[in-house]
Amino acid sequence: MISLIVCSIAALSAAQAPLFEAEMIFPPEPKHSHGSSLVETPKGELIAAWFYGNGEKGDDTLVINGARLKKRQHNWTKPFLMADSQDLPDQNPVLFVDPRKTLWLFWICSQDNTYNTYIVKYRTAAKYNGAGAPQWDWQDVIHTRPKDLEKLFLDDVAKYPKDYEGNAETHKKYLTWLEDAKNAAPKKLAQRQGWMTRIHPLMTSDKRMLLPLYSDEFACSMVAATEDWGKTWSYSQPILNLNVQACLVKKKDGDIVAYMRDRGAARRVPKAVSKDGGMTWSHVELTDIPNPDSSVDCIALKNGHWVMVCNDTSGGPRGGRNQMSVWLSDDEGATWKWKRNIEKHGEECAASYPCVIQAKDGLIHCSYTYSPKEGETIKHARFNETWIMEGNAK
């Protein structure tokens, strides 16, 4: 009995020892590899997806690529094709396994190579173990219809700053966007096109899935909800005031918190709260976490702690994306007591667009765009809370 207790204590100590490991999914190359997503399958395998090509919305060669990492291995498979809309730019894949163990792939493509003509697509697979791409068995388009966007946006945009902190060119672009957005808001087609994916869905019950979306047209976020596995969708009111790419975290009391990418001049992570399952949202507040107009991701861990990964700078080399850190909260985001740098560089390298999940064994996994001077790739890091807690946010 004593030996069993000693073994158990030793195993617990090993599990709690600080751990951080990272590797590139494939070697850096000249083409653009960006906007990754990560998911763990029920068998403990990781699947990553990203968009790949020569640019972004102006490049009709863009496709969605993927790769696999077998359990307890460190070498990813060679990339394979996950989706191709044929001569349209495919971007921003989102992978998710629902409670039925169905694999989802959400992504976007632009009809006219512009940010206001994106449509949201998805496909699902029941069979996705083994080599290469999953065996997709269903595909559809999500026809987005934001709730009350015209009235809420026009009321809110009247309060937006007329002067944008930055150089003259930035200020001119901001004022042009402001005028274009006001003109677009009353138009149904403008409201319904241009919504984009970025961050994984949130299950708020065994059947209710919330998919965060965002619009560069209106610089706001929104939630699409389904309770019948994608047969029908309902839509929230917009999360307003210069934000995009919301990630959703559910509190123990049922409130849903959205953290976003800042599109304003504050250069801090915006935050909004929903008390009705994601359908209406509080006005955006700003947290103390810096944000250089770059994507963030946040999840609740099994023990109730929250983990956020972001570029936590206000600017600087590579647009402030030279540093990417993980932050940890033990009070559901009220405070963020610990942080560790995942990447920290000068002009020679950037890291951005994180996707964060927690695996069944408790380890935290993060995929992200990694851009050294010699090219671009997707990088994968695994770490635990003990490693994060060796840092201090102060």
Image (spheres, helix red, strand yellow):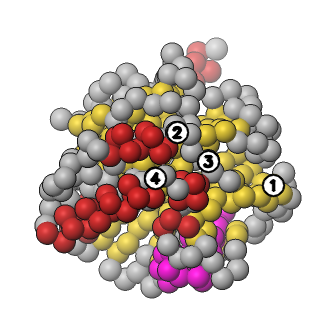
* Mark 4 crowd level (few <14, some 14–19, many ≥20, 10 Å Cα): some
Q: In the image, what residue type sits under mark 1?
A: Ala
The alpha-carbon separation of the residues under discs 3 and 2 comes to 9 Å
* Mark 2 crowd level (few <14, some 14–19, many ≥20, 10 Å Cα): few
Q: Which is more N-terminal, label 1 or label 3?
A: 1
Segment colored magenta: 49-73
Q: Secondary structure at mark 4?
A: loop
Q: Quadrant of residue 4?
A: top right
Residue at which label 1 appears = 125
Numbered tag placed on residue 185 in the rendering: 4
Is 67 placed left or right of 346 in the picture?
Answer: right
Of residues 170 and 358, the one nearer the viewer is 170
* Mark 1 crowd level (few <14, some 14–19, many ≥20, 10 Å Cα): some
The quadrant in which the C terminus is found is top left
Q: Position of residue 286 (x, y in %)?
A: 27, 37
Q: Position of residue 12 (x, y in %)?
A: 52, 28
Q: Is residue 308 visible?
A: no
Q: In the image, what residue type sits under mark 3?
A: Arg
Q: Which is more N-terminal, label 2 or label 4?
A: 2
The residue at the point 61 percent across, 47 percent down is 145
The residue at the point 30 percent across, 71 percent down is 349
Q: In the image, what residue type sits under mark 2?
A: Asp
Q: In the image, what residue type sits under mark 4?
A: Ala
Q: Nearer the viewer, mark 3 or mark 1?
A: 3
Residue at which label 3 appears = 145
Numbered tag placed on residue 148 in the rendering: 2
